[in-house]
Amino acid sequence: MLTVFVVVVALVSQTAARYTPDWTSLDARPLPSWYDEAKLGIFIHWGVFSVPGFGSEWFWWHWQGQQPPDQKYVNYMSQNYPPGFTYPEFARQFHAQFFNPDEWADIFKASGAKYVVLTAKHHEGFTNWESPNSWNWNSVDTGPHRDLVGDLAEAVRNRSLHYGLYNSLYEWFHPLYLIDKKNGFKTQEFVLQKLLPELYNMVVRYRPEVIWSDGDWEAPDTYWNSTEFLAWLYNESPVKDTVVTNDRWGAGCACKHGGYYNCEDKYTPGQLPTHKWEKCTSVDTLSWGYRRNMKMNELLPLAALIEDLVRTVAFGGNYLLNVGPTPDGMIPPLFEERLRGLGDWLEVNGKAIYSSKPWRVQSENTTVPVWYTSKGLTVYAILTAKPPMSTVKLLAPKASAITQVFLVGNPTPLSWAPVNPGGGLVVLLPELPYTPAQAWTLELDLVQ
């Protein structure tokens, strides 16, 4: 009955659609302004894969999906679990007993992030909410016995942060998906009976303002019915005016179709893209999900995270930084340290990040690496290393006699001198305050 209702809703929506179910129409939708202004989001990979906590969130696939299996995962299971132990048995150990959504939301707020994206469902198919289409393989029927998606939604929104959900289109071992795959994706049993009803239900129930789609690459968007879903999302859904989506809606869609572009994990362009984009990356360089055996030198230090954020924003992107909570619901202290350090830096330097726009020049490296952002006639020069001397040379800005330069966080104007008549200036720096972020911002009020 639910499937029939969803199909009827989708058909009715299309007849009155402002956006039609084709990429020409969907790609023309303006991106809601809140997203570009936000700049920073927190990604959370949390699920049954957090229980073995080994390798990565692709544990099940590496153990029993790929052929031949990855021997590291086979050995891990044989050394730590009894013969015949199955992956679904991990769900009963996904207790989340220490999960406090308010504590999480406080950390995310303190990080300076403006939006949060939680995995509602990863490739393993386990849903972190009581999906009616995932019976006994969800966080209410088993494991935590609570609505993780809903509990975090309330806490995040109570702190005026935008809330989004990650959803994998495909599921490694779902019987209906495997049938469709065997049929060369000429049939759509999985899409019509599982994926679409679940997506519609998720949107109506939780009203996510970001839908971070993934798991699309094995089949074209026509198999997933992506354009039909997006037309409904943009025209009729309860978040039609505020929702943003990424570009993972079918094989070949990445970097071509969707609201904003991810292109690929940890995407870093070499020049200013023409389309809004987002870099997703993780504090843990080897995994998105929690790893019991992660080491300090495998985590990105705060200074590297700040530089990555600054570079991303200078190139017009948003920065989605991932953490992987433990199966009992804790954000590892080293992750929390990075997030709070990020927030401390943004508390001082955030005016150069939030609601900023790319400048005509994105970077230069004369004295030290410098990244530029702008707001109107104000240009921000972000130094991602401490200058070896008490001056810094900026060649890109064209200053005038009434240009003023400030160190952000310091109200006293700085002395400067022109480099040459065509532009550039040398700024006399004060003693730069110590910061673990190793980044400082100069504000240039240019009148030109």
Image: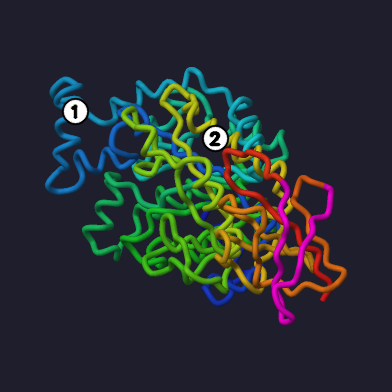
> Do we see residue 122 in this rendering?
yes
Q: As rendered, which of 284 and 52 lies closer to the eye?
A: 284
Name the residue furthest front: 389
Rendering coords of residue 66 (x, y %): 19, 48
Residue 149's mark? 2
Magenta residues, start to end: 411-430
Local crowd size for mark 2, using a 10 Å CA cut-off: few (<14), some (14–19), many (≥20): many
Residue 38 to residue 370: above or below:
above
Q: CA distance from mark 1 to mark 2?
A: 29 Å
Question: Residue at left 55%, top 63%?
Answer: 277
Foreground label between 1 and 2: 1
Q: Position of residue 20 (x, y in %)?
A: 58, 72
> Which of the 4 quarters of the picture holds residue 55?
top left
Colour mode?
Answer: rainbow
Q: On the picture, is 192 further left or further right than 2? A: left
How many callouts does the rendering have?
Answer: 2
Residue furthest to the top in view is 97
Q: Which residue is mark 1?
A: 77
Taking the spot 62% from the left edge, 39% from the top edge, the residue there is 435
The residue type indicated by label 2 comes to Val
* Residue appearing at x 35%, y 21% in the figure: 93
Q: Quadrant of the C terminus?
A: bottom right
At horizontal 71% and vertical 35% (from top left) the residue drawn is 159
Q: Amino acid at mark 1?
A: Met
